[in-house]
Amino acid sequence: MSIINNASNLKHKTMIMLTYSSGLRVSETVKLKAEDIKRDSMRLRINQGKGGKDRYTVLSKVSLKHLEKYWKAYKPGIWLFPGVKKNNPMSIRACQHAFYKAKDNAGIKKEAGIHTLRHSFATHCLETGMGIFQLQKFLGHKSLKSTLIYVHLQEEKTKADSPLDVYLEADLADCK
């Protein structure tokens, strides 16, 4: 979170936040349009992602609030994150630069690029209970093997509840 909080401006903060919270590739982030935000279903449409495939991923409530604030402040045109010329999307390099600047501002010395946000998204989704097949869809992977590459879970960080505890919790309370 410190990288997000140390972005140099609202545009960069929103862009980095959205990249992390939706598990986007940098090339997908820069190609987003306002019409890709699906508020009703809290989804983000990715057009022509890697391999030329379209998909949907999750849209965070927090990211949506920042997108609204960003929209009011910047009033972007065609592209959600326009480049120097408003009719062009921000370049991948400019997006990467914004990430590195925020990382430096946060005082993080560990080597990491903007793609680390995608790895973190995958790991954190699994740690918070998302299923591997749902994650596979959100990441846009054809093969489950590709999804598993992103997962660097350590056993002690994995939390799992027994189905008995989840589904029969009320019945157990009655037994006391």
Image (spheres, helix red, strand yellow):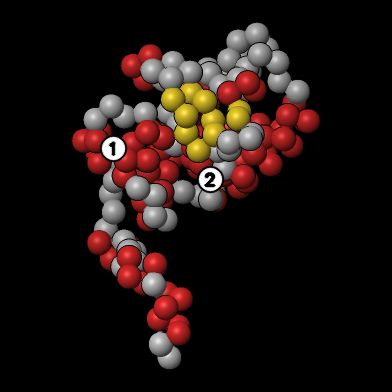
Residue at (38% x, 14% y) in the render: 52
**The one of 95 and 35 positioned closer to us in this rendering:** 35
Tell which tag, 2 or 1, sits nearer the viewer: 1
Q: Earlier along the polypeptide chain: callout 2 or callout 1?
A: 2
Q: Quadrant of the C terminus?
A: bottom left
* Quarter assignment of residue 115: top left
Q: Residue furthest bottom?
A: 176
Please give the residue where the numbered disc 1 appears in the rendered image: 147
Q: CA distance from mark 2 to mark 1?
A: 24 Å
Q: Position of residue 130 (x, y in %)?
A: 39, 49
Residue 79, compared with residue 157, is above or below; it is above
Q: Is 132 left or right of 10, judged from the image as shown?
A: left
Q: Residue furthest left?
A: 145
Q: Is residue 99 visible?
A: no
Residue 73, compared with residue 170, is above or below; it is above
Residue kind at label 2, given as amino acid type: Ile
Residue at (40% x, 87% y) in the render: 175
Q: Is 84 left or right of 52, judged from the image as shown?
A: right
Please give the residue where the numbered disc 2 appears in the rendered image: 3
Residue 106, compared with residue 97, is above or below; it is below
Q: Is 144 left or right of 161, judged from the image as shown?
A: left
